[in-house]
Image (spheres, grey):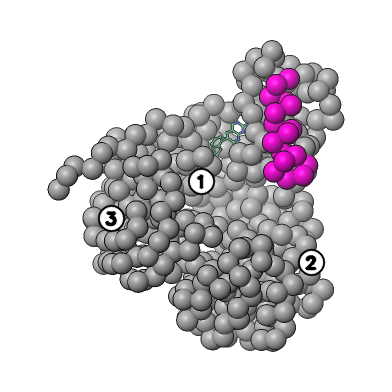
């Protein structure tokens, strides 16, 4: 078992990993930029190393400095969290070359799943349901027209190096195809340095339902059921829940089996997430596979009573999984609390938190790194806390979320607490009748002057 793990991340996920390390008797090393000198993960870790100035490119993305920090502290493993270097194949490789265990996927696996067209071809080979469309990358526009016609409009043009919606275009009729093809390729080239495109049948008003999986070094995998992540704004998840209000026991079994089949086919090691698009007829289709722990992992932990970070560490240390699958015993909802102003188009609101009261009580979990007097640096993403409520039923979990949001006090900056409070009263959310289109029609109601 590892003696010391360096957490190559910051914020709430660094706190999350440090907590599990302490429970497992593993020493922890925090790394921080000069902007994070006063951040909580620096204080909670056993050791802390400053790896550079505020810009991520000079600190949390600076592989040489992170490896140097691991060397001087004699860490035998690195946990990358999510974002930053968590799906960087080169970093995974460098860790391997320095004989520091990367608690994540191998370089080959990251590359294979990071290339969306190749990930899809792999899933077709594995017999996982995929959206009908092109077999791999489209070489030229002539082929694009031909495949779009064969697929049948509307189609979705997608960037193979993409993800999160970049380089993606919905095309409803052939006359719009050329512009979409050119602009999507330009966007992808600019964003990823790669303009490989593929085509899929457009799935209208889909839900985004993902399956958590864990694979071990013996090539076995299990699933821990689903998370519904359909409430997104500009491809940023705002809230997630499990079980999905759209799920049936039969669909859960089918999607879970498909996700395990995918993981075992590629001999996936570690925690991963297989993302599916689900249409209104409950047909599901492979979308992407993420080779990292995800922001929303706590709702799964809450309903199956399982520590996913602990499992990542055990699997990385070669401990086999039990092999059983996990099904939700409760209902859990996560609201991502961001330092953004929902009354001003969610624009960022960094600054000093002059007063903070965190909600608590039965069934309330908060994963956060902030405290009263903490100054949120403008350099990193805006998430300051994850508020998670868990109860026997969805209605009770919603009710508990409303109560917790009403208790949540943050002064000195704006946050998305008011947005989530209104969301919990929205009829389409409360009825569970929402898709990835939900936020397109959502309007914040002005605050009642109280
Ligand atoms: C799709 C789709 C409809 N049909 N593919 C968005 C980013 C990336 N995860 C893939 N995405 C989509 N792919 C086909 N064939 C609709 C989306 C999509 C979406 C998917 C999940 C969650 C939110 C979304 C918001 C807009 C579009």
Determine which of the numbered discs, if any, sits on residue 93 in the image. 2
Please state the horizontal and vertical placement of residue 408, each as a whole percent of the image: 28, 60
In this image, 221 relative to 416: left or right? right
Total numbered labels placed on residues in the image: 3
**On screen, 108 above or below 241?**
below
Q: Which residue is drawn at 85% across and 30% down?
A: 139
The span picked out in magenta is: 178-194
Q: Which residue is drawn at 81% across and 23% down?
A: 141
Figure quadrant of residue 427: top left
Figure quadrant of residue 435: top left
Please state the horizontal and vertical placement of residue 352, each as a whole percent of the image: 37, 65
Q: Main secondary structure of the magenta part?
A: helix
Quick check: is 303 in the magenta stretch?
no
Please state the horizontal and vertical placement of residue 89, each as a whole percent of the image: 75, 60
> Which quadrant of the figure shows ligand 1?
top right
**On screen, 260 above or below 376?**
above
Q: Residue at x 78, y 78 (%)?
A: 99
Spatial separation of the CA atoms under disc 3 and disc 1: 20 Å
> Which residue bears the numbered disc 3?
405
Between residue 88 and residue 267, name the one nearer to us.
Answer: 88
What quarter of the picture does the N terminus occupy?
A: bottom right
Q: How crowded is mark 1: few (under 14 residues within 10 Å), some or many (20 or more)?
A: few
């Amino acid at each position: 078992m590892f003696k010391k793990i360096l957490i190559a991340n910051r914020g709430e996920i660094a706190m999350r990993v440090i907590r599990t390390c302490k429970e497992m008797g593993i020493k922890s090393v925090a790394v921080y930029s000069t902007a994070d000198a006063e951040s909580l993960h620096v204080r909670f870790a056993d050791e802390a190393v400053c790896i550079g100035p505020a810009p991520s490119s000079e600190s949390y993305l600076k592989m040489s400095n992170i490896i140097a920090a691991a060397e001087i502290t004699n860490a035998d493993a690195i946990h990358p969290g999510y974002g930053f270097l968590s799906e960087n194949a080169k970093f995974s490789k460098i860790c391997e070359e320095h004989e520091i265990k990367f608690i994540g996927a191998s370089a080959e696996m990251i590359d294979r799943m990071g290339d969306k067209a190749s990930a899809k071809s792999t899933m077709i080979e594995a017999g996982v349901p995929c959206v009908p469309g092109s077999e791999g990358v489209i070489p030229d526009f002539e082929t694009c027209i031909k495949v779009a016609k064969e697929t049948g409009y509307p189609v979705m043009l997608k960037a193979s190096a993409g993800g999160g919606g970049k380089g993606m275009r919905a095309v409803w009729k052939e006359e719009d195809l050329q512009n979409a093809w050119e602009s999507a390729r330009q966007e992808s080239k600019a964003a990823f340095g790669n303009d490989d495109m593929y085509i899929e049948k457009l799935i209208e008003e889909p839900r985004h339902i993902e399956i958590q999986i864990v694979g071990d070094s013996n090539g076995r995998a299990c699933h821990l059921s689903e998370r519904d992540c359909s409430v997104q704004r500009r491809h940023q998840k705002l809230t997630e829940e499990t079980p999905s209000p759209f799920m049936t026991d039969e669909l859960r079994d089918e999607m879970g089996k498909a996700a395990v089949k995918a993981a075992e086919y590629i001999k996936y090691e570690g925690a991963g997430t297989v993302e599916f698009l689900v249409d209104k007829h409950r047909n599901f289709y492979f979308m992407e596979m993420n080779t990292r722990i995800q922001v929303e992992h706590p709702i799964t932990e809450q309903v199956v009573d399982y520590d996913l970070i602990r499992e990542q560490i055990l699997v990385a240390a070669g401990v086999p999984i039990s092999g059983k699958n996990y099904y939700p015993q409760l209902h859990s909802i996560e609201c991502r609390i961001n330092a953004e102003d929902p009354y001003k188009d969610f624009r960022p609101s960094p600054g000093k938190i002059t007063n903070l009261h965190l909600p608590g009580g039965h069934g309330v979990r908060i994963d956060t790194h902030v405290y009263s007097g903490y100054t949120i640096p403008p350099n990193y993403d805006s998430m300051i806390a994850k508020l998670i409520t868990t109860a026997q039923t969805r209605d009770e979990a919603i009710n508990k979320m409303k109560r917790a949001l009403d208790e949540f006090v943050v002064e000195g900056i704006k946050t998305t607490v008011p947005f989530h409070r209104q969301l919990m009263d929205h009829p389409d959310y409360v009825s569970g009748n929402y898709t990835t289109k939900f936020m397109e029609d959502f309007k914040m109601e002005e605050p009642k002057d109280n």
